[in-house]
Image (cartoon, helix red, strand yellow):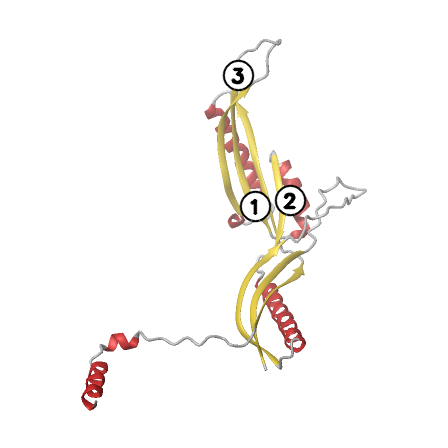
Amino acid sequence: MKSALALMALGVAALPVAALAQTSVTIAETAPVVTLNVTESVEAAPNVATVGTGVQTRALTAQAAMQDNAAKTEKLIAALAKAGIAKKDIQTSGINLSAQYDYSNQDGKPEGPRFIGYEASNQLTVKLRDIKKVGASLDAMVAAGATNINGPSFSIEDPSPLIQQARGTALKSAKTQADFYAQAAGFRTARLVSISESNSGGQPPMPMMQSARFKADAAPTTPVEPGQVSASVTLTVQYALDK
């Protein structure tokens, strides 16, 4: 019997150190666990407006369409710079050139498409950092030759303070709910086990409404109402209910 025990001890001692190091112990949570999904949002006034603008031109040749477009786009960019918009806030978002055809039937005759020239376009994405001047900036773009405008889209450049605030509110709300479940189920406390988060910041919570404003002694400026933007945090938290 002693020999057998000695052999067993020798066998354990002879195990490689690496094999012993791989041993792991997992202790499962034995208390009931409640899982909560909590979303909280914080709203604030935006400080950035993003606008898409650009120029479209047509000509009989591709080269003429591109050259005309280049000249008008340079004029538009110069007007944006003159309005105080920094170069870093003006970005080319797309340049296109395509042949144009007339597909309508002439005199009721079923003819094939008729080539009518080329269309060139240059699209810009512009950040406007003075929210009060967004309407005037849009008017200036059109006056400088812009043929299309998209937006504005409002946001907050640094939403992290709002996200932090929403995070704290969400965690407090989760704790309140967990305590309620603990007491209702006859437990003493709710102990935090895990937290996971997803967030979004500085985006419009709903479409912006516009209202007309006119000046009796000047041409009307395009009305723009920035409204509020929202930063939100969603927490998935787990609480163990302890006796």
What SS does tag 3 mark?
A: loop
**CB within 8 Å, label 1 to label 2:** yes
Q: Identify the residue shown where x is 67% and y is 58%.
A: 45
In this figure, which residue is indicated by the disc labeled 1?
126
Q: Quadrant of the C terminus?
A: bottom right
- The amino acid type found where label 3 is placed reads Pro
Between tags 3 and 1, which lies in front? 3
Q: Quadrant of the N terminus?
A: bottom left
Viewer-proximal residue, 38 or 222? 38
Q: Residue furthest right?
A: 216
Q: Identify the residue shown where x is 36% and y is 75%.
A: 24
What SS does tag 1 mark?
A: strand
Residue 63 locus on image (x, y percent) = 46, 25
What SS does tag 2 mark?
A: helix
How crowded is the residue under tag 1: few (<14 C-alpha within 10 Å), some, or many (20+)? Answer: many
In this figure, which residue is indicated by the disc labeled 2?
137
- The amino acid type found where label 1 is placed reads Val
Mark 3 or mark 1, earlier in chain: 3
**CB within 8 Å, label 3 to label 2:** no
**CB within 8 Å, label 3 to label 1:** no
